[in-house]
Amino acid sequence: MPGAGKSTIAAGLEKKGFKSINMGDAVRAEAKKRNLDPTGQNLGKLMLDLREKNGQGAVAELIKDQIASSKSDVVIIDGIRSNEEIEVLKKIATVKLLSIHASTDTRYNFLSTRKRSDDPQDRGTFNDRDSREIGVGISASIALADESISNNNLTIDQLIETAYNTIKKWLK
């Protein structure tokens, strides 16, 4: 779910040599092409429009070339939202899914301090965003994850190290 720590992990793993691709960045790039302001409302609507017009795996389709051109053995995809996106990615690579859990309060606090243009400014907007994410299928993807990390009481270093150790285990 938004604010659980996925991007923090992705940034930390990049420092350890992994390639990272953020699916939200792909939506933001598409918004820029369409001259849309990168507000939460605009990006959410664009994400839904892309899925409606091109199928539930549409956002994963936007990043396929980045994955294919990567020279890294491991590519971290930040922001899977549906099983259909996972199926798109499985056509080009081996996929392992790591879900990051955090309580609603923890996620809201993380997002409130992050200050990205699409972050919710209040609880109502936060709840609306959660509902939208659940509507596109994120719950099913979380439920089918290969591994999960709870990020309610971890430091950033502990969170990144836990994810790193999980990926190292997968590579054996």
Image (cartoon, helix red, strand yellow):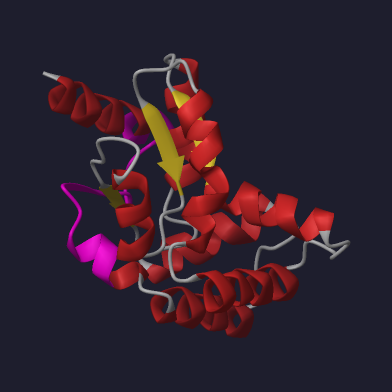
* Image location (x, y in percent) of residue 39: 76, 67
Q: Is residue 151 magenta?
A: yes
Q: How many marks?
A: 0
As rendered, which of 81 and 119 lies closer to the eye?
81
Please tell me which residue is depicted at 40% across the width and 29% down the height of the picture.
75
**18 w.r.t. 92: above or below:** above
As rendered, which of 32 and 53 lies closer to the eye?
53
- Looking at the image, can residue 115 be seen? yes
- Looking at the image, can residue 116 be seen? no
* Image location (x, y in percent) of residue 4: 42, 55
**153 w.r.t. 8: above or below:** below
* Image location (x, y in percent) of residue 153: 31, 48
**Horizontal side of residue 161 vs 76, given as left or right:** left
Please tell me which residue is depicted at 47% across the width and 53% down the height of the picture.
60
Residue range highlighted in magenta: 140-159
Please tell me which residue is depicted at 54% across the width and 44% down the height of the picture.
63
**60 w.r.t. 104: above or below:** above
**85 w.r.t. 104: above or below:** above
Q: Quadrant of the N terminus?
A: bottom left
**Horizontal side of residue 137 vs 141, given as left or right:** right
As rendered, which of 85 and 16 lies closer to the eye?
85
Please tell me which residue is depicted at 43% across the width and 61% down the height of the picture.
106
Q: Quadrant of the C terminus?
A: top left
* Image location (x, y in percent) of residue 30: 72, 56
